[in-house]
Amino acid sequence: MKRYTIQFLCMLLSMAILPGCSKDLPMDEDGLLITDRAECYVSNFELLGADFITVRTSNAVIDTMACTIDVEVQFGTDLKNLYPQFSLASDAKLDPKIVGKVDFSDLQNPKVYTVISGNRKVRKPYTVVISIQNP
């Protein structure tokens, strides 16, 4: 009898809580929650080689005003097989998405990634400029 009473109470409690869980929360096309945050910046940048070890010679220089990321890589780095990693402002997202290795070998045409704010209203294109360490 005690077991049924506990189950009944749990069922009543869940019925009382579930209506408060609305499925009307704003979501974007990626299934991410849209918030009221307008911050839109890159706070950190990492560049990994095919072995998932950094190829940077020093910290990337991130200019949030000019929206550029300057990074020097070790001499001999395979620029066709790199894995960029961005740290963004809270609730921000990156476009295009990074789903695997990226080819950065065309140094004359740097890659551009757009940071989109949590409220999805602010968009800032960041240019990733790669230079190679002197041998």
Image (cartoon, rainbow, N blue to C red):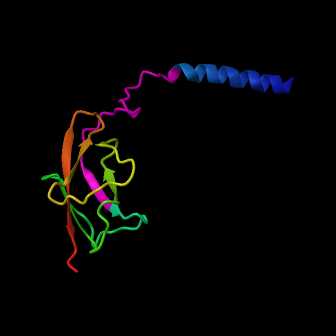
Give how far across and how far down residue 46 sits, in percent.
33, 61
* Helix, strand or loop: magenta stretch: loop
Q: How many marks?
A: 0
Nearer-the-camera pick, 3 or 32: 32
The magenta stretch spans residue 72: no
Residue 83 appears in which quarter of the rendering?
Answer: bottom left
Question: Quarter of the image containing the N terminus?
Answer: top right
Residue reaching furthest bottom? Answer: 135
Image side of residue 113 versus residue 85, left or right:
left
Query: What residue is at 37 percent from the left and 65 percent from the top?
Result: 49
Give how far across and how far down residue 27 sits, in percent.
38, 28
Span of residues in magenta: 20-46
Residue 47 appears in which quarter of the rendering?
Answer: bottom left
Query: What residue is at 31 percent from the left and 60 percent from the top?
Result: 80
Residue 110 appears in which quarter of the rendering?
Answer: bottom left
Query: What residue is at 30 percent from the left and 59 percent from the top?
Result: 45
Give how far across and how far down residue 73 sits, in percent.
26, 69
Q: Is residue 117 above or below residue 63?
A: above
Question: Quarter of the image containing the C terminus?
Answer: bottom left
The magenta stretch spans residue 35: yes
Query: What residue is at 19 percent from the left and 45 percent from the top?
Result: 125
Give how far across and how far down residue 88 sits, in percent.
31, 49
Nearer-the-camera pick, 67 or 109: 109
Nearer-the-camera pick, 19 or 31: 31
Residue reaching furthest right? Answer: 1
Q: Is residue 52 above or below residue 96?
A: below
